[in-house]
Image: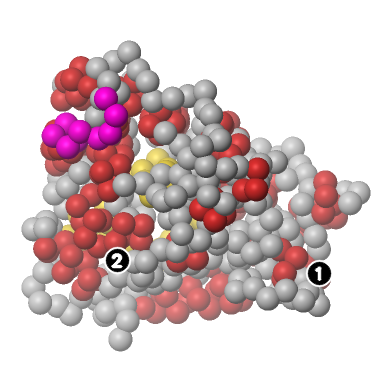
Amino acid sequence: MTTAADLDDGALEFEHVPESDQSFENALAKAADGKRLSVDDAVELLTTGTESSGIDPARKERVLELADRRRAEEVGDTVTFVANLNNNVTTACNTGCLFCNFKNPDDAFEVDADVEHSGFTKTPAESREAVRDGLERGIYEVTSVSGLHPAFALDQDHREILENYDDPARTVNYKPPERYETDPGTYVEQMEAMSVGGVHLHSMTPEEAYHARRGTERSYESIYGRLREAGLDSAPGTAAEILVDEVREVICPGKMDTGEWVDAMEGAAAAGLPVTSTMMYGHVENEMHRAKHLKVIRDLQDRTGAITEFVPLSFIHQNTPLYEAGVVDGGASRDEDELLVAVARLFLDNVEHIQSSWVKSGDEHGLKLLNCGADDFMGTILSEEITKRAGGEYGEFRSVADYVEMVGAIGRPLAERSTDYEETRRVEMDGGPYGPKLGPKADGTPLLD
């Protein structure tokens, strides 16, 4: 397994490099004609031409303008957002991803552990209370993404299977809940706890689904089907990072490979769940890796039709092992952010919605990305732990009034949406007060007093 200590700046050599037999002009012409782009086309557009180094400002603007026009043609000018709450259950995790500072070693949570940490584990009852509070404030969706706590099992039957292994901590990464100060319950118990009051539950990444089936031969469809019975409404396509295995072997060697990620997403779709898709970029990967990742997403959508949105996530580097070990010295540039969003709009011809993240980019740059091909501006989230713990600087919450001010500044209409975009409600920018109206208990009251 690769660790940060095994790596040093400049030591990485990849088979896949940003070279192509295509030209920038031909790739842009194909995009303008609405033809399906190849990986080489995407590389040319992401680099603004592989015949020279650096991003060409004039060429970049041509890509952005084309993507913005495509966005307007496909989804119109309305900027959408969802009123949601993040309820991450636990930071306990022993996967060892080098881009992450969200996790805490699981043994720090054990009974009598003499280790200081700033992490947390919530019981199902605590998760239920957090969601109920969010519902009263008017949220539509609860998003839950958590560390891979060794005490987690899918349900009690799964727990019994794991406990019957010889040395389950080593063979199937399982430790009984009584070893820990707080019992997280099972995945099913957490889903049942959070699925209250008509809220839309968006949870269980492919990596969490892998954790929920470990030690068994169960299919991903059956895992997600069991979770759907417990209240799961849709699944986030996170844990994707870069869907090229030579990159994953560097930044997340303990995680599932690309094929396993795809299998999990196909299983979620087969179980009848809408899914999202993501890319976490700006670390050790190059433009060829980004283009190949987009191809994996597009092919998956061709087969399933289940992907509701693509979410580019610019790497936040400050407090991560990759940065601390000197493997990276920063994240993606703003030019790279803009081109990634634009090329995603042009390449993913079967994914309707592209998201801009104020958590990763901040308000000003996030708004710029809405003019580069993105049409969605995330959600209110109320609490954000993952990016904050990695060194993010852009806060944890946005009110509906914040959205009115931000989106009004670029002269675009604003609408609150459902998770799957099937339902939207126009926000009239008439002076407020502004609050969500789509949630089960939303009545237009501001989220925070």
Expressed as whole percent of the image width and height from the top left, the position of residue 276 reads 42, 46
Nearer-the-camera pick, 9 or 141: 9
> In this rendering, is residue 422 above or below 35?
below
Query: Whole-Å distance between the Cαs marked 1 and 2?
Result: 42 Å
410 to the left or right of 311? left
Q: From the image, which quarter does the N terminus lie in?
A: top right
Nearer-the-camera pick, 414 or 96: 96
302 to the left or right of 212? left
Residues shaded magenta:
52-60
Residue 322 in sight in this render: yes
Please tell me the numbered disc located at residue 429.
Answer: none
Q: Amino acid at mark 2?
A: Leu
Please tell me the numbered disc located at residue 179.
Answer: 1
Q: Amino acid at mark 1?
A: Arg
Q: From the image, which quarter does the C terminus lie in?
A: bottom left
Expressed as whole percent of the image width and height from the top left, the position of residue 369 reads 23, 49
Was residue 103 drawn as part of the magenta stretch in this picture?
no
Q: Which residue is mark 2?
A: 438
Nearer-the-camera pick, 232 or 337: 337
Residue 188 in sight in this render: no
